[in-house]
């Protein structure tokens, strides 16, 4: 068993920080980092989704049905007819939408776990523990 550490609480009394408390604090910290990683990924994925939707709209506005469309495949381009290009872009839009939904669900899950840990730690330590982020 690890020895307990002591900290001073906001009311001047000593509160013992057990190994379980420290594990909860560490878990909260890891979840907070993961939350911000997901937030960054979600922002990029939403931007990608908007770009793909714009591309899909542009394809619909092409007047000449016979005109070939250059579609990026890796580092090269392929000429596709409009129908094939539209199917390709629609598949990418669908994939991006699933990715956004998955990231949003994961973000909610992480936030819920953080709230649970925060509530547990606030009960024991009150305002002597700061689990809120500084807003710059």
Image (cartoon, rainbow, N blue to C red):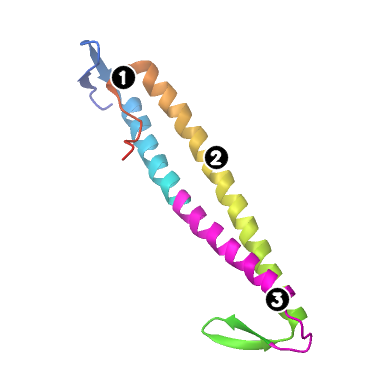
Distance from disc 1 to disc 2, alpha carbons, whole Å, reads 25 Å
In depth, the one of 84 and 15 nearer the eye is 84
Front of the two marks 2 and 3 = 3
Q: How many marks?
A: 3
User: What residue is shown at x 37% (from left), y 23% (from top)?
Assistant: 121
In depth, the one of 136 and 5 nearer the eye is 136
Q: Which mark is residue 71?
A: none
Q: Earlier in the sequence, mark 1 or mark 2?
A: 2
Q: Residues within 10 Å of mark 1 (few under 14, many from 20)?
A: few
Q: Which mark is residue 59?
A: 3
User: What residue is shown at x 34% (from left), y 31% (from top)?
Assistant: 25
Q: Which mark is residue 127?
A: 1
Distance from disc 2 to disc 3, alpha carbons, whole Å, reads 35 Å
Q: Is residue 59 highlighted in magenta?
A: yes
Task: Tell me which segment is drawn in magenta.
Answer: 39-68
Query: Residue 13: x percent and y percent?
Result: 22, 10
The relative height of residue 3 versus residue 89 in the rendered view (above or below) is above
Is most of the magenta stretch helix, strand or loop? Answer: helix
Marks 3 and 2: in contact by CB < 8 Å? no
In depth, the one of 45 and 67 nearer the eye is 67
Horizontal side of 4 relative to 45 (left or right) equals left
The relative height of residue 101 versus residue 114 in the rendered view (above or below) is below
**Image quadrant in which you'd find residue 128:** top left
Q: Which mark is residue 108?
A: 2
Query: Residue 133: x percent and y percent?
Result: 34, 35
């Amino acid at each position: 068993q690890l020895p307990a550490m002591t900290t001073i609480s906001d009311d001047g009394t000593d509160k013992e920080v057990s190994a379980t408390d420290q594990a909860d604090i560490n878990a909260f910290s890891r979840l907070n980092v993961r939350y911000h990683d997901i937030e960054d990924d979600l922002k990029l994925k939403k931007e990608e989704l908007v770009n793909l939707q714009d591309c899909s709209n542009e394809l619909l506005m092409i007047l000449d049905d016979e005109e070939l469309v250059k579609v990026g495949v890796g580092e090269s381009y392929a000429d596709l007819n409009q129908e094939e290009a539209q199917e390709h872009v629609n598949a990418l839009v669908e994939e991006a939408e699933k990715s956004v939904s998955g990231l949003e669900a994961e973000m909610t899950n992480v936030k819920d776990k953080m709230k649970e840990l925060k509530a547990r730690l606030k009960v024991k330590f009150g305002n002597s523990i700061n689990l809120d982020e500084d807003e710059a």
